[in-house]
Amino acid sequence: MYRYDEFDHQFVSERTAQFRDQANRRMSGELTEDEFRPLRLMNGLYLQLHAYMLRVAIPYGTLSGKQMRQLAYIADKYDRGYGHFTTRQNIQYNWIKLEETADILQALADVEMHAIQTSGNCIRNVTTDHWAGAAADELLDPRPIGELIRQWSSLHPEFSFLPRKFKFAITGAPHDRAAVKVHDIGLRAHKNDKGETGWEVMVGGGQGRTPMIAVTVREFLPEKEVIPYMEAIMRVYNLFGRRDNKYKARIKILMHELGAEKFKAEVEAEYARHPVQTTEVEQRELTRIEKYFAQPSFEKMSRFAPHFENAKRENVDFTRWAKNNLATHQVDGYTIVNISLKPEGGIPGDASGEQMRVMATLAERYSFDEMRVSHAQNIVLPHVKLEDTFAIWQVLKANDLAAANYGLIGDIIACPGLDYCALATARSIPIAQAISRKFADVKKQEEYGPVKLNISGCINACGHHHVGHIGILGLDKKGEEFYQITLGGSSSENASIGTILGPGFAAHEVPDAIETILNTYVKLREPGEEFLGAYRRLGPKPFKEALYATA
Amino acid sequence: MPLLKNNQFVNDEWTRVADADALPEGAKIIVNSARLIQDWDLLAKYTGLLGVSIANNERAEILTPYLSQLSLIVLNFPAYTDGRAYSQAKDLRLDGYRGELRAEGNLLLDQFQFMHQVGFDSFAVNERFALQQWQAASKQMSLAYQRGLFRISGEREVWSQRHQGFAPWEEQPHAG
Ligand code: HEM
Ligand code: SF4
């Protein structure tokens, strides 16, 4: 894991002091709310429906036990005893007081964390594959370049007042778990025949009200050119991105209005106009960072894990959890544990302070002191011995963390919606809870196979509804909430935007509608065919017929 | 409107000359980019010092042919949230412009250091803030991760510090 050195420490503590001063100036009235807004936003502080909301950066989703404990402490001391893990691998606290914010930032700085650039029109927290460094299909760990980009983008003087927010996502594996094609910039690792690393640069993806799939502007950018090339892209965007309409201000719109060819030409021209002298320092910095992400000292073990096999024979619930929530690790005898934060009827992504401490202890004891936050709002223990999984599961079970629904219909992504969010047009949490209850039986969930169900409480799409295999968008019609359903979205390497099926549904009709869709799939699927594959083969028609015939 | 330079208030010796106005002899004048380009034959022989102001939706490249004869370039922040002039400034400095680079518009304390870092060295500020506030604002952070920034004294470049032995990237002096 990355550790701060003296410079990083100093940087964050100066920044914390600066924010304390800004907050004091706001409280004394020296700063107007209008002037304070962009400053607090640069530090992750939003004003929401009921209180301030603080969003804490978890760079590339990686956390140590100590950091998780501090998040728990903040939840207990400054919030109402819980925190909300988000699709951007961050955590949000929904009940924050302005007077306490600087103290919270100090508590974060104490464990090498911060809230810098978790909002505002700047480069946001960099996200990566949540299985980075562990996944069996990985080419290389995307986190070192993520850390390099995190540092480079921190308080970047040129790019802190962009037309709109800017999000990077990075994957080091061919199977994309980081949704890189729906980010402003997505990077994907490739190796050439000389074994050198290069990055495919994808630009202009996004969700929100105009969802778009990113365009590849470079197939293979040599690693040493990443920082200067990103500067060129950012400069073109900063200069030419639209500022007249905030709904058209993302880089995807610039890409769309210029056209991919013209956009590429602008970037290449900017890049050629100011060639950098050398990137030797950047390369050394990357090498320095890579050392922090060296593989932990795995034991040499056989693939066969007798205790694990025994436990499975003896306990059906454990077997079910192991089947759904474990993923293949790079190293024999190890596995990736996915802790679902989606208990039956729960709020997706919420964890209590106590649960955070339990997970911290498990990570310290069994996973080389490491955890990840996934963009599906779950927590990952990336490096666990198969032999330890039964013990882990027992602890999880005792703490309401053992939902066996990872990747299934119960593993719902949902944004905060109207329960917390000032922009919402409808609630999303209660819909998620209702669906979760409807499909409480994991056996039934397994019959449906892998399905991603994503819910957003408004067109901004924080809940990724456009790229859910099933997407639900909450809208408002004359004071009544109603929900539009889309099918066929995906955020993987074969990314696609979902198609709207037809008229929306009232909140109480949604769970049944979802069941109708899933039953239609079960009826029409070919052997072994997953939901998304079946939808892509069949198209929306049979689903539409089933839904609206009964309605 | 006070002019801030080297962290002190100074007199602004520059005069803006509107499009139709005659050029005062031997003065320090600011014209807009359209006039600069249109009247270049005349302006190239101007007896005083020449400055230009460009809007933040103009490309900095339009000034490339004239850079060596310009003593002042004025860039505009119509709103502090509109960050285009940061990139225009960076572009001009990367293009080799060494003259005075002035920021005007909606300038606030909290962006002041960023402006220094991309190469601005004079600031047409409003009366709202006292000199000490500007001075303090110019050094809120003592280090930056990015290389190739313009730094006021004492500010450190993290990556170059970590990897000693490499000259900081394109370190350039301010025009003063
Ligand atoms: C509760 C306060 C929140 C507010 C006010 C808010 C605001 C917004 C807005 C306005 C957009 C649209 C941006 C655009 O299209 O230009 C957006 C997009 C997005 N937000 Fe949020 N959001 C909030 C919470 C969250 C949460 C909790 C998450 C993570 C679970 C999140 C993750 C995202 C993502 C992934 C997108 C879509 C990708 C994109 O286009 O950037 N947001 N948000
Ligand atoms: S999708 Fe809309 S309702 Fe949900 S968090 Fe984002 S802005 Fe709020």
Image (cartoon, helix red, strand yellow):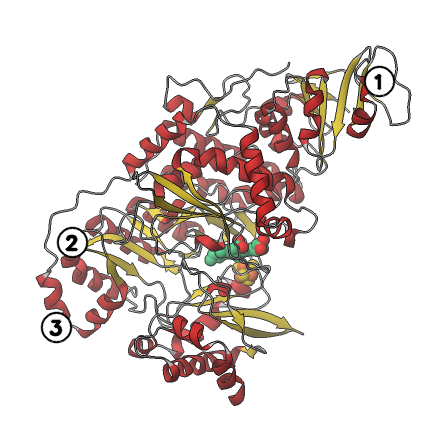
Residue at 54%, 21% (x, y): give it: B151
Q: What separation in Å lies between label 3 and label 1 (alpha carbons)?
A: 94 Å
**Residue A27 visible at all:** no
Residue lying at 39% horizontally and 68% vertically, measured from the top left? A346
**What amino acid type should be assigned to the residue bearing mark 2?**
Asp
Q: Which sits in the foreground, A2 or A331?
A: A331
CA separation in Å, label 1 and label 2 = 78 Å
* Mark 3 CB near ligand 1 (8 Å cut): no
Q: Name the residue under label 2.
A: A332
Locate residue B22: give its quadrant: top right
Asked whether, in this view, residue B137 is left or right of residue B73, the answer is left
* Left or right relative to A334: residue A184: right
**Three-letter amino acid code of the residue under disc 1:** Leu
Q: Are marks 2 and 3 on the same chain?
A: yes
In the rendering, at what x and y percent does residue A21 appear?
55, 34
Does dot 2 land on a helix, a strand or a loop?
loop
Whole-angstrom CA distance, mark 2 to mark 3, is 23 Å
The amino acid on which the numbered mark 3 sits, given as a three-letter code, is Glu
Task: Kindly identify which residue carries mark 1.
Answer: B42
Give coordinates of residue A296: x percent, y percent. Answer: 21, 43
**Label 3: few (<14), some or many (≥20) within 10 Å?**
few
Residue on which the image places disc 3: A314
Q: Residue B45 in the image: x percent, y percent?
A: 81, 13
| Residues packed near mark 1 inside 10 Å, few (<14), some (14 to 19) or many (20 plus) | few
Q: Is residue A429 above or below residue B109?
A: below
